[in-house]
Amino acid sequence: NAGVTQTPKFQVLKTGQSMTLQCAQDMNHEYMSWYRQDPGMGLRLIHYSVGAGITDQGEVPNGYNVSRSTTEDFPLRLLSAAPSQTSVYFCASSGVSGVHSPLHFGNGTRLTVT
Amino acid sequence: AQSVTQPDIHITVSEGASLELRCNYSYGATPYLFWYVQSPGQGLQLLLKYFSGDTLVQGIKGFEAEFKRSQSSFNLRKPSVHWSDAAEYFCAVGGSSNTGKLIFGQGTTLQVKP
C-alpha cells in the first residue's frame, strides 16, 4: 500500500532556480491538493485538483504552478524559487464519496531556498 | 471569514494524565471537522472526523472529540496520555463539497513528561 508518494524528501535550491515536486497516489482518488506547512501557521492550501485536467488555486498560489494530466499524478512546479518558499510541502488526496472523505497525506518534501 | 484557531501552541502533560486540546472554528456553512496528528518527519494522520449526528466522536488511539455548535468548538480529548502521543495536532474544517480543501489551525505541540 503506497498511498501518497512524494519525491524528493529534501531539496535545496538557489534563488531563481526552478524545480518540480512530484506527487503520486495509487488509490484512484479524484481529489488532490498541495499544502505548505510553516511554523505557527499550520497548513495552507496552494493548489488543488478535482480531477484530471481540472485545477484551481488555493489560499497561497503565487509562485507555484500545477497540472493534472492523469488521475495518479499532481506535480507542483516552482517557477523561480524565492527564500519565502522555504517550507515543508505536503501533497494530499481524497476519494469520491457521498460525504466529505478525509485527506490522505504524503510524508512531505522539505525545501530550502538560499 | 473561515478560520480555525487552536489557542494552545504548546502543551505539556505527564504520562497517564488526561488531555484536552482546544479548537475553535469559524465557518459559514455546515462544518465538517477533523483532527489530524503529525509525528516528527511524517505526514498527517487522521485521528477522527465529525460530519453529523452524535456530537461525541471516537477516533483512533483512544482519542475522542466533542462538537459544540453553540461554542463553535471541537475539542480533542484523551483520558490517559501515553508517551507515544507526543506529536503535533491539527484541527481542520471543511465544507460539504468533497474537494479536499481544508482550513487548518496553527497546530498544538504536545509534549509528554515521563
Image (cartoon, coloured by chain):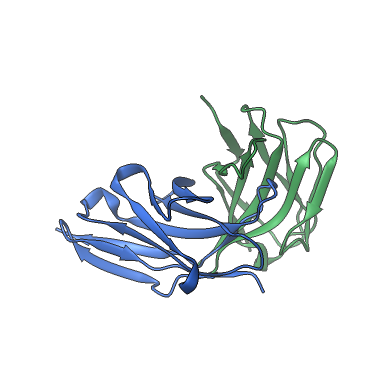
Name the residue: 32% across, 62% down: B110
Furthest-front residue in this view: B53
> In which quadrant of the rendered image does the C terminus of chain B lie?
bottom left
Chain B appears in which tint?
blue
| Rendered colour, chain A | green
Q: Compared with residue A77, is residue B9 higher up or lower down, i.e. above or below?
A: below
Seen from the viewer's position, the closer of residues A16 and A55 is A55
Name the quadrant containing residue B61.
top left
Q: Residue at x 22, y 52 (%)?
A: B83
Q: Where does the N terminus of chain B fall, quadrant-wise?
A: bottom right
Which of A20 and B17 lies nearest the eye of the viewer?
Answer: B17
A12 and A34: which is toward the camera: A34
Query: In the image, residue B66 lies at what x, y percent?
Result: 39, 59
Horizontal and vertical percent position of residue A102: 56, 44
In the displayed structure image, the side of residue A53 where residue B33 appears, left or right: left
**Position of residue A86 measured from the top left corner of the image (x, y, whole percent):** 61, 62
Residue A22 appears left or right of B84: right
Image position of B110 with respect to A103: above or below: below
**Residue A26 visible in rendering:** yes
